[in-house]
Image: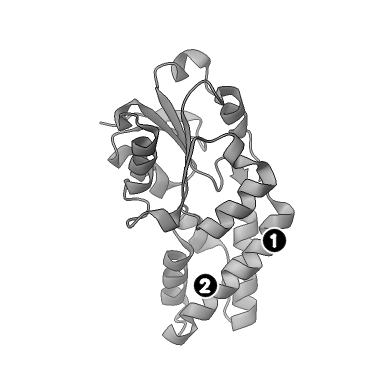
């Protein structure tokens, strides 16, 4: 995936969670589909994949807009997605190959997790995979004001690690996350194409 010589150029490594180090995206997609079945709308995971890295509320808003779902269903849609998704992910989530880099650099470089998932989901996955044993810092959606593609999540990670953002490499699997890393002045390793995208 990445050779050690390349990684030596960076002081710290920052990882997205869903779709980057943990395979949760199919579970999230299935949860959205089940929400649609309950509410009577043909919802799939398509919008979620388009908005990879966005919060559940942002995805819910776009879903309602495209499917012309009345505003009164917003709170119920978010509640159902979280509840159903929580149960599916608890059973089906699995580690992805990028986690091998986390394990290889644990204790060797400062490591942070910067995710658009909310704290309750991060806590679930942290317990399942002992994430807090690997990461020096974890920043979730509840801890920032502006979400991806805004760079706040990753800049907060760098700040808590006490590392210059330009010395960080971000690992991402979604367009919004790639944009967030680059906007923060960080190089980004896009796991979809196995390439580093350099910040201008």
Q: Classify mark 1: residues with Cα within 10 Å, few (<14), some (14-19) or many (20+).
A: some
Along the line of sight, which residue is nearer the eye, 144 or 179? 144
| Residue at numbered disc 1 | 88
Residue at image position (58%, 75%) is 42
The mark nearer the N terminus, 1 or 2, is 2
Q: Classify mark 2: residues with Cα within 10 Å, few (<14), some (14-19) or many (20+).
A: some
Secondary structure under the numbered disc 1 in the rendered image? helix
Q: Residue 5: x, y in percent?
A: 47, 13
Question: Image height check: is 185 above or below 118?
Answer: above
Disc number placed over residue 8 in the picture, else none: none
For marks 1 and 2, give the CA distance.
15 Å
Q: Which quadrant does the N terminus fall into?
A: top right
Q: Which image quadrant is residue 182 in?
A: top left
Secondary structure under the numbered disc 2 in the rendered image? helix
Question: Image height check: is 160 above or below 80?
Answer: above
Q: Residue 29: x, y in percent?
A: 60, 61
- Taking 118 as reference, is 165 left or right? left
Along the line of sight, which residue is nearer the eye, 157 or 34? 157
- Taking 18 as reference, is 141 left or right? left
Residue at image position (60%, 59%) is 28
State if disc 2 and disc 1 touch (CB < 8 Å): no
- Taking 60 as reference, is 148 left or right? left
Question: Image height check: is 163 above or below 119?
Answer: above
Q: Residue 168: x, y in percent?
A: 38, 29
Residue at image position (56%, 52%) is 122
Q: Residue 111: x, y in percent?
A: 48, 32
| Residue at numbered disc 2 | 78
Q: Which quadrant does the C terminus fall into?
A: top left
Residue at image position (58%, 67%) is 82
């Amino acid at each position: 995936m990445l050779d050690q010589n390349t990684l030596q150029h960076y002081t710290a490594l920052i990882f997205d969670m869903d779709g980057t180090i943990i395979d949760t995206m199919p579970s999230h997609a299935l949860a959205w589909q089940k929400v649609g079945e309950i509410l009577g709308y043909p919802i799939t995971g398509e919008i979620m994949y388009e908005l990879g890295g966005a919060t559940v509320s942002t995805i819910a808003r776009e879903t309602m807009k495209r499917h012309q779902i009345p505003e009164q269903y917003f709170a119920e849609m978010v509640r159902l997605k979280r509840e159903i998704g929580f149960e599916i992910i608890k059973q089906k989530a699995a580690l992805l190959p990028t986690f091998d880099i986390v394990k290889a650099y644990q204790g060797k470089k400062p490591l942070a997790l910067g995710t658009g998932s909310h704290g309750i989901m991060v806590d679930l996955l942290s317990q399942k995979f002992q994430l807090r044993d690997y990461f020096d810092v974890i920043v979730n959606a509840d801890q920032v004001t502006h979400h991806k593609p805004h760079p706040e999540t990753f800049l907060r990670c760098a700040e808590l690690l006490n590392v210059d953002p330009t010395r960080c490499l971000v690992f991402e699997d979604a367009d919004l996350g790639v944009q967030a890393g680059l906007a923060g002045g960080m190089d980004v390793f896009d796991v979809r194409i196995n390439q580093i995208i350099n910040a201008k």
